[in-house]
Image: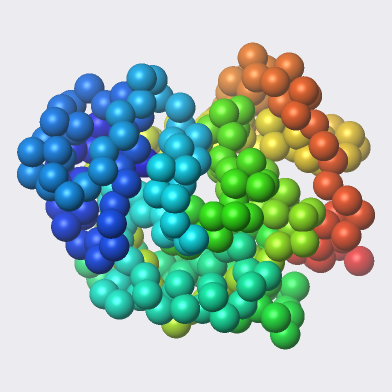
């Protein structure tokens, strides 16, 4: 999935060791033509408009493989680790999402979220290869296609960023497992062509509000709305940006079962 990052793609795509499906979200910088000319082995799927993370769902369907590893236009899997991750998935049939270790920038700093995942209070169930998760980072994840599509993939409502939460909740509700596996690595060299931090916070809060409407009990939805109102300008703007999609979110509303809510309470540190 990419949009208007032609130069980043021309640098990162040759690093991938497996067949690549690039779903382009209506770029206007000549991405599609440039990739097709420079890297004809890449399957390029142009979208007619920017559909956010739903483009990944399109890519998974197009790939048609047992597993799909996601990568952003500024990330790639370490040499040999795609095959290693697939072997881990095959050895753990309940595993729907494997989240790799993510190293950031040329200095290869461990992404702080990886330290959090490694210390997951959900523990390590015997049928998973690492600490159990109730979320993941898409650019560092390999998914089991069967589970991903059965759970609806990434949807058209939440879009991007923060798209992982709704999917993770649905996978957990269906009994699938997600785990952090630090024996496989993804390199992430953040593109300079990124949204300002305030814009990203706004987009994340939009996703948070819509995901809560779709999957959380009503008191928790109220809590998310109050937190947005009490936050700064980006949080309040995120709430406003969610409003046009509230009807669509409500049509897809399906609160998660008690077992998943308990996992959420454990992650939040509640008794």
Q: Position of residue 117 (x, y in %)?
A: 59, 70
**Left or right placement of residue 228 versus residue 149 in this view:** right
Identify the residue at the far left of this view.
Answer: 38
The C terminus is located in which quarter? bottom right
- Residue pictured at 70% horizontal, 37% vertical: 211
Examine the image and state in which quarter residue 206 appears.
top right
- Residue pictured at 77% horizontal, 55% vertical: 174
**Left or right placement of residue 125 versus residue 238 in this view:** right
Q: Looking at the image, which is closer to me, 207 or 20? A: 20
Identify the residue at the far bottom of this view.
Answer: 126
Q: Position of residue 151 (x, y in %)?
A: 67, 46
Whether residue 31 is visible: yes
The N terminus is located in which quarter? top left
Q: In the image, is residue 255 above or below residue 230?
A: below
**Left or right placement of residue 183 versus residue 106 in this view:** right
Examine the image and state in which quarter residue 213 appears.
top right
- Residue pictured at 88% horizontal, 51% vertical: 257
Q: In the image, is residue 243 above or below residue 44?
A: above
């Amino acid at each position: 999935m990419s949009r208007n990052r032609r130069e980043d793609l021309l640098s990162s795509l040759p690093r991938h060791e497996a067949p690549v499906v690039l779903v382009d979200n209506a770029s206007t910088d000549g991405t599609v033509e440039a990739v097709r000319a420079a890297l004809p082995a890449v399957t390029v799927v142009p979208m007619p408009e920017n559909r956010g993370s739903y483009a990944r769902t399109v890519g998974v369907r197009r790939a048609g493989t047992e597993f799909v590893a996601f990568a952003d236009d500024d990330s790639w899997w370490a040499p040999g680790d795609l095959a290693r991750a697939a072997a881990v998935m095959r050895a753990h049939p309940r595993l729907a999402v494997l989240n790799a270790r993510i190293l950031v920038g040329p200095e290869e700093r461990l992404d702080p979220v990886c330290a959090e995942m490694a210390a997951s209070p959900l523990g390590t169930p015997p049928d998973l290869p690492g600490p159990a998760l109730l979320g993941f980072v898409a650019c560092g994840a390999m998914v089991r296609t069967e589970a991903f599509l059965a759970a609806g993939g990434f949807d058209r409502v939440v879009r991007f960023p923060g798209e992982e939460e709704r999917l993770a909740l649905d996978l957990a509700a269906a009994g699938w497992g997600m785990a952090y596996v630090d024996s496989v690595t993804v390199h992430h060299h953040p593109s300079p062509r990124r949204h300002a931090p305030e814009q990203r916070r706004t987009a994340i809060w939009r996703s948070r509000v819509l995901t809560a409407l779709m999957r959380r009990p009503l008191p928790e939805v109220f809590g998310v709305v109050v937190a947005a109102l009490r936050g700064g300008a980006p949080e309040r703007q995120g709430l406003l940006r969610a409003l046009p999609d509230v009807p669509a979110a409500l049509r897809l509303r399906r609160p998660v079962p008690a077992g998943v809510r308990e996992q959420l309470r454990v992650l939040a540190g509640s008794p």
